[in-house]
Image (cartoon, rainbow, N blue to C red):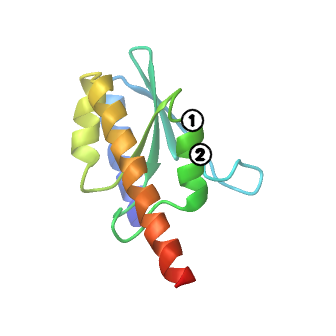
Amino acid sequence: MAKEKQLEQKLKKEFKRNNIEYFKIAGGRFQIKGMADLLVFHDFNSYALELKYDLFKNRPTCTQLLQAERFGEHVIWLFVDFNNADYVLEQIKNNNTKVLKHYGSVQRKYFRELLKIKEKGKND
């Protein structure tokens, strides 16, 4: 089983155990590119989770970052891997939206800066 699939199974199991509703986005050519893997709904809050095995090795794509920027004000958009999954799960369970909004914002800023550095390196 692919490692991202293992992470997805872990999250879905925890969501079910805690009565947290979620919806799996199925990828494919008829799906909007860059959409999050899981949409999570808990206590009138919506979360978009983009799952990665390891965010340092398997970074979000430009399209995923653009979608996160586009929807980041309306939904709490997070990049989740095995390193931060427990933290994100705990914050969702506790409905700690302020922390997760900030966390998602910091993640987007970090990956934007990495892309800028990468692009600058290509142009030099």
**Crowdedness near tag 1: few (<14), some (14–19) or many (≥20) residues, C-alpha within 10 Å:** some
Residue at 53% over, 52% down: 65
Residue at 70% over, 56% down: 28
User: In the rendering, at what x and y percent does residue 70 appear?
Assistant: 60, 39
Q: Considering only vertical position in the picture, is 122 above or below 105?
A: below
Where the N terminus falls, by quadrant? bottom left
> Looking at the image, do the residues carrying marks 1 and 2 touch, with CB atoms under 8 Å apart?
yes
Instruction: Say which quarter of the image contains residue 103.
Output: top left
User: In the rendering, at what x and y percent does residue 43 appear?
Assistant: 38, 15
Separation (CA) of disc 1 from disc 2: 6 Å
Of the residues shown, which amino acid type is indicated by label 2? Gln
Query: Could you say which is closer to the camera, residue 22 or residue 100?
Result: 100
User: In the rendering, at what x and y percent does residue 23 appear?
Assistant: 53, 34
Q: Which residue is mark 2?
A: 67
| Residue 18 appears in the picture as rendered | no
Q: Is residue 72 left or right of residue 1?
A: right
Of the residues shown, which amino acid type is indicated by label 1? Phe
**Crowdedness near tag 2: few (<14), some (14–19) or many (≥20) residues, C-alpha within 10 Å:** some
Q: Which residue is mark 1?
A: 71
Disc 2, SS: helix
